[in-house]
């Protein structure tokens, strides 16, 4: 009854706004005087200019807001079912976003991710990336190292999430509400108001709640995975003459009640696993509360000659509180209290030439500073509590200057050259302490390891390319590009070096059958040096980073989109073959539970209570296999057909299928503990559109496939079960 009242109240609220929204993708797919039943151009901005995706000589996938809905993409992790070579693996606090097997997320705050994620041009720290999409203009996924325009941590690729900007062209908006299984209720909407001929504002909001997919059978009756999410965004546009200023602020509040996981088979607490993946057995309290403030300011001025001066400023503040049952069973009492806060300031300034002549160019500079605070308390017991406190305070600075030029040798052939000089400064303080609050220990605990340290490095990266416009419908390109990810430190005595990659690619983008059919195909070969990998650092007992000697990655990707009358289709496929060098490291699967102390010095005994641990018996040779989190095959298929029912009424069924191949999660390559099986997921929807209104019946994971979606430590996460429901929306 409560849901019925709430659903009705929300419909009344939004319909009160519904007197003015263009399509969610209003500026991203344009017909450009083409017949209505052909494919419109997809406009992307990842290279600082508004360009037709078919004319951009890079491997990329772009989806506007409508296409995200068609492909059942609700959040960043769902993009792996719509873009080839992309995989997203659950790791609790962060997600491991990988493109072509590059971009492993690390728990260390001094590590840069290999896949950079941007929201409205602002780089996003790797925490708080699971919030829902709403009022999205488009999403662009760039594959391969982006060593010129994007920055120093994009060895795997970059993802640009662009929200809808305010517009001066009238009052617009949309309202949407849905109800589905697990008592899931969502409501979102946006309203765009032109205040004057030069000033417009746009407000958007999102609310989502859902019961948990899991039951906690333990004594505390936790509710991990239960979702309550709220977000709001305000945008302001001021555009007098040749000047344009766009400001956005957003607040996100997401509470899930904790993470849901069980022990991995073959690990120490596997005997405490429940028989059903949807049953948990915790004996410690759980909590997950994420809050984020995101802001951006873009200033653009176009001079008389067409040159654009662009400034993008950003500030983010993200905070997370977590409580874990780290053993995930009632066999032991091991709990962790975790607080993470990351603040970021960034500034980019660039000069962009027009592209009307034979010569074009982009010049710019970038600065970014991140301050990260981590406070972790691990407690094990009874009979007696055994606390271990981990404190980490990190200050990271990234800077760069870049230039990219293009010159048309002929009307059809263009050469490009891009260069970027990037630097990174990383310093921090921290410690591992034991015995906090216990008798016979100093106030605040006894320090057993220091996590302080510093690291500086820099590299020159860039790109050389040749682009051949065979005719109006075909673009061939080839390039060599170098990418770089900075190094860092694990402690005062342990550093890891920067990671570099050379990428060699060829590609062909084509349109056929009078723009009814469009394809993008390409092949690549990448050679990595000092590949970074997250591992236990014996000096501190905490996760750190090691450099693998080398890595090679090769493969191909292909995408297709088609529109023939009422029939629409799309698909993508990727094959990625990788090989890593070998190294010596601690095998975390063999460690006794709760091990997080530093290595004992020669002749030092652990003592009682222990102050150190001997890792030597647990060190082995790892590597020599494929990249982690890197499926060899990924593909996705989608099809829909729009039936005209007369007037402005249509009925459109759509079906999607996506496959993510198997992948390893640990360099020891155990098929029991370090392997995620492949899975194929089926989704569908049926949409009845009547003028500006639509009613959708939707279903995801229709085969109710049970699969492991990720790992953290000795625990594993699971994908969502079958879900279905009804969604109502209006645009005005």
Image (cartoon, helix red, strand yellow):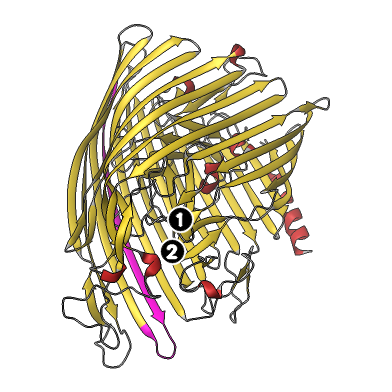
Q: Is residue 641 shown to the viewer in this render?
A: yes
Residue 213: percent from left, percent from top = 64, 62
Q: Quadrant of the C terminus?
A: top right
Q: Is residue 523 above or below residue 264?
A: above
Q: Residues within 10 Å of mark 2 (few under 14, many from 20)?
A: many
Residue 368: say if magenta: yes
Residue 497: percent from left, percent from top = 21, 50
Check if mark 2's residue and mark 1's residue have beta carbons within 8 Å. yes
Q: Is residue 544 shown to the viewer in this render?
A: no
214 sits to left or right of 709 = right
**Residue on which disc 2 sits:** 320
**Between residues 374 and 433, which one lies in front from this camera angle?**
433
Q: Residue furthest top?
A: 410
User: Which residue lies at the image location 22% right of the left edge and 58% below the top edge?
Assistant: 489
Disc with the residue nearer the chain's start (2 vs 1): 1
Q: Is residue 215 above or below residue 74?
A: below
Q: Quadrant of residue 409?
A: top left
User: Which residue lies at the image location 44% right of the left edge and 88% below the top edge?
Assistant: 382
**Which span is picked out in magenta?**
360-386
Q: Residues within 10 Å of mark 1 (few under 14, many from 20)?
A: many
Q: Residue furthest right?
A: 646
**Element class at badge 2:** strand
**Between residues 729 and 12, which one lies in front from this camera angle?**
729
**Residue on which disc 1 sits:** 128
Q: Is residue 377 above or below residue 474?
A: below
Q: Could you say which disc has been placed on residue 536 in the image? A: none
């Amino acid at each position: 009854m409560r849901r019925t009242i709430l659903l009705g109240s929300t419909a009344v609220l939004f319909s009160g706004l519904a007197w003015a929204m263009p399509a969610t993708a209003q500026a991203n797919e344009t017909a450009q005087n083409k017949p209505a039943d052909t494919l419109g151009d997809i406009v992307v901005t990842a290279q600082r200019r508004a360009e037709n995706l078919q004319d951009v000589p890079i491997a990329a996938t772009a989806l506007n807001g409508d296409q995200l809905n068609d492909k059942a993409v609700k959040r960043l992790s769902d993009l792996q079912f719509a873009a080839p070579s992309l995989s997203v693996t659950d790791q609790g606090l962060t997600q491991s976003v990988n493109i072509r097997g590059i971009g492993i997320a690390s728990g260390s705050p001094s590590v840069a991710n290999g896949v950079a994620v941007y929201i409205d041009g602002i780089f996003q720290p790797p925490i708080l990336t699971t919030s829902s999409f709403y009022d999205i203009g488009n999403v662009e996924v760039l594959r391969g190292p982006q060593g010129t325009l994007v920055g120093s941590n994009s060895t795997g690729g970059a993802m640009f999430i662009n929200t809808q900007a305010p517009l001066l062209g009238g009052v617009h908006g949309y309202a949407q509400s849905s109800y589905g299984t697990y008592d899931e209720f969502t409501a979102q909407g946006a309203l765009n108001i032109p205040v004057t001929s030069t000033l417009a504002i746009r407000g958007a909001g999102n609310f989502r709640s859902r019961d948990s997919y899991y039951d906690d059978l333990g004594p505390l009756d936790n509710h991990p995975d239960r979702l309550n999410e709220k977000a709001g965004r305000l945008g302001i546009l001021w555009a007098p003459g040749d000047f344009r200023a766009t400001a956005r602020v957003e607040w996100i509040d997401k509470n899930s009640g904790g993470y849901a996981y069980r022990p991995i088979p073959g690990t120490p607490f596997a005997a405490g696993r429940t028989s059903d993946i949807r049953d948990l057995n915790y004996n410690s309290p759980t909590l997950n509360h994420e809050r984020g403030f995101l802001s951006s300011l873009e200033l653009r001025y176009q001079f008389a000659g067409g040159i654009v001066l662009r400034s993008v400023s950003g500030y983010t503040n993200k905070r997370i509180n977590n409580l874990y049952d780290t053993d995930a069973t009632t066999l032991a009492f091991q709990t962790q209290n975790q607080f993470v806060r990351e603040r970021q300031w960034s500034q980019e300034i660039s000069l962009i030439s027009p592209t009307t002549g034979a010569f074009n160019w982009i010049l710019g500079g970038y600065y970014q500073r991140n301050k990260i605070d981590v406070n972790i308390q691990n407690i094990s017991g009874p009979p007696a509590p055994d606390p271990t406190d981990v404190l980490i305070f990190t200050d990271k600075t990234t800077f760069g200057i870049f230039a990219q030029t293009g010159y048309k040798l002929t009307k059809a052939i263009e050469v490009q050259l891009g260069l970027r000089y990037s630097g990174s400064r990383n310093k921090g303080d921290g410690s591992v302490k034991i015995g906090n609050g216990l008798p016979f220990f100093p106030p605040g605990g006894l320090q057993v390891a220091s996590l302080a340290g510093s690291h500086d490095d820099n590299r020159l990266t860039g790109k050389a390319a040749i682009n051949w416009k065979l005719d109006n419908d075909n673009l061939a390109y080839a390039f060599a590009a170098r990418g770089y990810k900075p190094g860092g430190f694990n402690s005062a005595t342990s550093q890891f070096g920067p990671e570099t990659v050379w990428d060699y690619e060829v590609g062909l983008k084509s349109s056929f059958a009078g723009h009814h059919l469009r394809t993008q195909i390409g092949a690549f070969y990448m050679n990595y040096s000092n590949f970074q990998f997250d591992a236990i650092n014996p000096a501190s007992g905490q996760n750190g980073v090691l450099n693998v000697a080398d890595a090679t990655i090769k493969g191909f990707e292909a995408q297709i989109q088609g529109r023939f009358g009422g029939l629409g289709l799309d698909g993508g496929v990727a094959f990625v073959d990788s090989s890593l060098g070998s190294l010596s490291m601690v095998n975390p699967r063999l460690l006794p539970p709760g091990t997080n102390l530093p290595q004992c010095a020669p002749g030092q005994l652990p003592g009682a209570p222990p102050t150190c641990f001997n890792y030597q018996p647990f060190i082995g040779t790892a590597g020599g296999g494929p990249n982690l989190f890197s499926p060899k095959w990924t593909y996705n298929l989608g099809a829909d057909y729009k039936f005209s029912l007369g007037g402005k009424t249509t009925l459109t069924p759509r079906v999607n299928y996506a496959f993510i191949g198997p992948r390893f999660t640990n360099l020891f390559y155990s098929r029991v503990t370090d392997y995620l099986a492949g899975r194929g997921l089926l989704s569908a929807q049926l949409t009845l559109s009547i003028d500006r209104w639509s009613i959708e019946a939707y279903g995801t994971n229709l085969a109710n496939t049970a699969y492991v979606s990720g790992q953290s430590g000795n625990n594993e996460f699971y994908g969502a079960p079958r879900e279905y429901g009804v969604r109502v929306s209006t645009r005005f």
